Image (cartoon, rainbow, N blue to C red):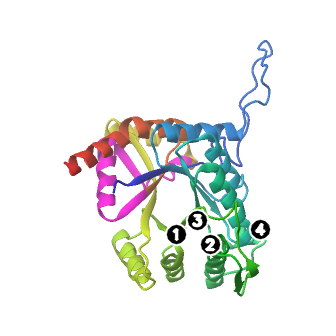
Amino acid sequence: MAPRFFVTLPTRGEGSRGGWRPGPRPPAFVTDLRPGAYGPFDHLAQIGRAAEIATLHGVLAPFDPEGEESLVVAAGLLRQSRWLRAVAEFHPGAATPVYAAKVSASLQRFSGDRLDWRLAVDLDPATARAQGDFLEGADRYARADEFLTIAKGVWTEEGFTYEGRYFQVLAGGFEPPLSGRPFPRVHLSGTSAEALDLSARHADVHVFTYADDLGDAIAELRRRAAGHGRVPEAALALPVLAREDDDEAWAAARRLPEDAAGAYPPGLIGSYRTVAERLRELAGRGVSSFFLEVRPSIEETYRLGEHLLPLLYEQETAHVR
């Protein structure tokens, strides 16, 4: 199966979520009939449009404790697109699992089942406390396990009852019209024993980073999941910057703003062919999905569709032949 590609939406600093600021005011002699007509969601909409035109599989709306709510962002992008999947990352302590499932069931109905979940389980302690969450250590993963168990339970069973340490449900469960839709594909992350055990029980996709030892990490995930009769997919999150040749790519990287440039050393920088070959190699090691971080998002997403993805599809076609 060909790998799937997602683009990660910016959280702040690029004019879209949390840190969005309007552009400069026109000079006094210019009459602007559209004051305030362009805002942060217009920027996000353009990224989503670029991703769909570029034939990417979907977008990730990351959890941003000081920015826009990811489920709302995902809903907006799903509404404006026909084929794009939206992965909404959120904190399991932000709402009850029943409410999160109900919101998501409605989004599945309205989008043709194109919503996925990603749980932000292991937050920085200060960030977690600012969200009203004072759980620490393994307790965070125990709560996430209950959260997913209940969300899946009320989604698929009538009269669902669960008595847990963090959540309780008595005779719950969805009826039509909310019932009968596919549950969102669950994305999880982390390399600790608790994180891998949670994915072994619940994840459809486990997202690693470029810094992880992929071979050992994927093998360990599959070993743990086998005990539950499951085979979660492996995904990889990484920054990408590609140009016609390697020198041009590195020159572009050096021109990035400092906050964006700092993200690229652990990612991929190089010619379109160099980056395509590396992605192909990673796919051969068991990575089925890639969450690509590109800046600036709109322009670079179009570049992916115009220059990089055709090389990957070309290689895939050659492999099939």
Of marks 2 and 4, which one's residue comes earlier in the chain?
A: 4
| Relative to 18, residue 135 above or below | below
Badge 1 vs badge 2, beta-carbon distance below 8 Å: no
| Left or right, residue 124 beside residue 132 | left
Structural crowding at the residue carrying mark 3, measured as other residues with C-alpha within 10 Å and reported as few (<14), some (14–19) or many (≥20): some
Judged from the image, the secondary structure of the residue bearing numbered disc 3 is loop
| Left or right, residue 317 beside residue 301 | left
Mark 1: which amino acid?
Ser
Mark 3: which amino acid?
Phe
How far apart in space, not on screen, are marks 2 and 4 (Cα)? 33 Å
| Relative to 45, residue 91 above or below | below
Q: Nearer the viewer, residue 237 or 314?
A: 314
Mark 4: which amino acid?
Ala
* Residue span colored magenta: 260-289
How far apart in space, not on screen, are marks 3 and 2 (Cα)? 9 Å
Quarter residue 164 falls in: bottom right
Residue on which the image places disc 1:
189
Label annotation for residue 183: 3
| Left or right, residue 100 beside residue 182 | right
Quarter residue 107 falls in: bottom right
Of marks 4 and 1, which one's residue comes earlier in the chain?
A: 4
| Relative to 126, residue 143 above or below | below
Q: Nearer the viewer, residue 193 or 321?
A: 321
Residue at horizontal 48%, vertical 75%?
Answer: 191
Residue on which the image places disc 2:
156
